[in-house]
Amino acid sequence: QMFSLIQDIMKKEIPELPAFIRGTGRQKSLKNLTKPQLASLRAHPVSLKHLDAYLQCLGKDPTAMFEDFLKLSTLAHERHVLDILRVGVPGLTVKKIAEYIERVDDMQCCPPSSSMQLWADYLRMLRDSDCDMTDSKLVYTHSLKREHDKVSRKLEQIRDEKLVEAFEQKAADNEWLEYKGKYLTAMVPKKLPELYEEGRKLSHCVGTYARSIIDGHSIIVFLRKNTKLDVPYCTVEVRGKTIVQVRGWDNCEGIRFPDIKSFLANWSDKKGLLLDVA
């Protein structure tokens, strides 16, 4: 079964051979493969191009089977598989890539020839936006095209230096609203990506409030449990000195939560705020 691979090697000049054959590369060689991986190789026609890419792939996913890698490479391109793995998503394997791409094809009507590149771009943008790459709902999104476009627009804003600078300045001006209670803490977002992450994790639209904050129309405050300050719990909008919105997961009314209601009473009293939630 390796005959075509040997022929492929023999047709090349030595400088044209991949680094792993010349002994100058860092990727794994055939002698490092497990018996199941070797069996997978022997069961399929192997080109030098695919073997070189597969060995590079093993540097990111040591468990990868050649048959899974070859299937993805055939559906799109081996470059896309490597691009996805190189993003560095924790726990991502070739097997998981294959399973997700199949679901995208079935449920989102986006064929692998398009979805592989789209997903690679999407994951890179998530990483560059400092998103939580351990969040499976984010990584394996149910709407790849839509989320890709949303992250692209957000990244454009994050890279807008004037917008970032204006947001951070406004955050400094709004720090007077920060307050720690017995069970909850009110925190003002300092960076633009924090605003987007709050909206994404709580499934509401606060991520669209950047311009309103910069223009001084709104102040957004995150309410967090003192024991979980890095986990979004509820989001508050303040206009002037009036609390006008309190939203939890999926836009539910946070004012109904007993712990939030008592916290808002103490917080508004300490900061001179009015509570007028529609």
Image: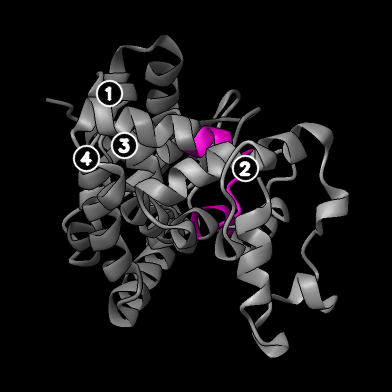
Q: Closer to us: mark 1 or mark 4?
A: 4
Give the mark nearer the N terminus: 4 vs 3.
Answer: 4
Along the viewing direction, whichever of 45 and 88 lies nearer the viewer: 45
Q: CA distance from mark 2 to mark 3?
A: 51 Å
Dot 3 crowding, Cα within 10 Å, few <14, some 14–19, many 20+? many
Q: CA distance from mark 2 to mark 1?
A: 42 Å
Cβ atoms under marks 4 and 2 closer than 8 Å: no
* SS at circle 1: helix
Give the mark nearer the N terminus: 2 vs 1.
Answer: 2
Question: Is 168 positioned to the left or the right of 86 in the image?
Answer: left
Give the mark nearer the N terminus: 3 vs 1.
Answer: 3
Cβ atoms under marks 4 and 3 closer than 8 Å: no
Question: Is 28 positioned to the left or the right of 44 in the image?
Answer: right
Along the viewing direction, whichever of 121 and 99 lies nearer the viewer: 99
Q: Closer to us: mark 4 or mark 3?
A: 4
Q: CA distance from mark 1 to mark 4?
A: 27 Å
Give the mark nearer the N terminus: 1 vs 4.
Answer: 4
At 37% from the left edge and 77% from the top edge, which residue is drawn? Answer: 165
Identify the residue position indicated by label 2 in the image.
66
Kind of residue indicated by mark 2: Phe
Along the viewing direction, whichever of 34 and 93 lies nearer the viewer: 34
* Label of residue 110 in the image: 4
* SS at circle 3: strand
Q: CA distance from mark 4 to mark 2?
A: 24 Å
Kind of residue indicated by mark 4: Cys
Give the mark nearer the N terminus: 4 vs 2.
Answer: 2
Q: Is residue 58 above or below residue 25?
A: above
Identify the residue position indicated by label 1 in the image.
250
Range of magenta residues: 83-97
Q: Answer whether residue 55 is magenta in the image.
A: no
